[in-house]
Image (cartoon, rainbow, N blue to C red):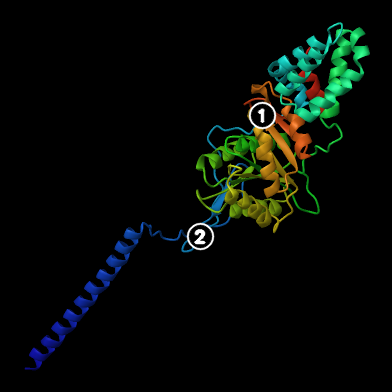
Amino acid sequence: MEFVLIAIVILVVALIAGLGLLVGRGRRTTRLDDDAVAGTTLTRPRPPVEEAPPARGSTASGLGLPPEAPEVSLPPAEPEPGLLFETPPPSAGRLVRLRSRLARSQSSLGRGLLTVLAREKLTEDDWEEVEETLLAADVGLAATTQIVERLRTQSMVLATASGTDLRELLVRELVAVLGPDLDRTLGTDRHDGLPGVVLVVGVNGAGKTTTVGKIARVLVGDGKSVVLGAADTFRAAAADQLETWGERVGVLTVRGREGGDPASVAFESVRTGVEGEVDAVLVDTAGRLHTKSGLMDELGKIKRVVEKQSPVTEVLLVLDATTGQNGIVQARVFTEAVDVTGVVLTKLDGTAKGGIVVSVQRELGIPVKLIGLGEGPDDLAPFEPGAFAEALVGGGD
């Protein structure tokens, strides 16, 4: 009888244990099924790895992770096999080297003006032709009026001037409206122990990411250390593109998850630059239509978040020169959203409307600091009014 009781007890215990296992399994299965319905994916937190200092050309990631996954310090990314660091040329004299390319695309402006001014006696029709030529080049009404009035006061000189004299006179008048006294220095130097911080903004398709990469080349060519921030989290291709630019010149790129908070990426980029004691941090932002107020407000947020680490020393607005006067409308909206300190005009080699430089400066009171003259990696040049006017007029040696 005693053995029978013991057997019954063992059987009951075994049944209870078996039921417990079945209930536990049922609960885990239900939780995973519920998550699947919600469209989420459960991931195990990655084990921590030993933190290593970032290498040149590596990617700092780990931004925008979900709450259940702790931030992890990732080892430096290895450069692409066979990828060699490039040493870009210094920025000094870069516009002079690219002058012939600019002159080819703008030649109609110089030829048209010189042809009219070389006539023996200038009539009202001739002056109207000068005005039309300048306006067609997007010089703008106010600047065109100023140039024509100054040339008219010298009409007696024009009647006896040689071709060389006419050219020099026209160059001089163009330089005068290009704002030769405006401060065109870039805020890319360290100050008070902190790096220069540059935000690059603009509409979709203006060439922001490419411009950031080219600016990095300019700075590296001048011997500066740089960190790149891929705060365009809406396009993974933009972060990949920027990372490639950084790898080629051996600078660090900080990026986050696609669709993550761009302000967080910008913040982490500047933090990395501060800790690394670099000279400059360049932050690429997502392209946004100037008509979308929500996206414009986001720029203000990015700037405020960044300045918790270091002051923003430069906000560059990238404008596509081929958009003409529409670029002025875009620029006004951006200047209302964030304090733009300089303009980068891209694609000037593909348009005969180089006068947009004048319009932007006069309408906005913001200097053009850089111009893009092609798709090559070194086709970005500091803006120099004298060299630019020479190229616009053309015909010189």
From this viewpoint, is residue 52 visible?
A: no
User: Residue most toward the front?
Assistant: 124
Foreground label between 1 and 2: 1
User: Residue most toward the left?
Assistant: 1
User: Who is closer to the viewer here, 147 or 189?
Assistant: 147
Residue 11 location, quadrant: bottom left
Q: How many marks?
A: 2
Q: Which mark is residue 66?
A: none
Q: Amino acid at mark 1?
A: Gly
Q: Amino acid at mark 2?
A: Pro
Q: Which residue is mark 2?
A: 48
* Relative horizontal placement of residue 291, taking residue 4 as reference (left or right): right
Could you give the CA–CA distance between mark 1 and mark 2, rounded to whole angstroms?
52 Å
The residue positioned 35% from the left and 60% from the top of the image is 38
Q: Which residue is mark 1?
A: 324
Q: Position of residue 232 (x, y in %)?
A: 57, 45
Considering the image in quadrants, where does the N terminus appear? bottom left
User: Residue most toward the bottom?
Assistant: 1
The residue positioned 27% from the left and 73% from the top of the image is 24
User: Who is closer to the viewer here, 196 or 12?
Assistant: 196
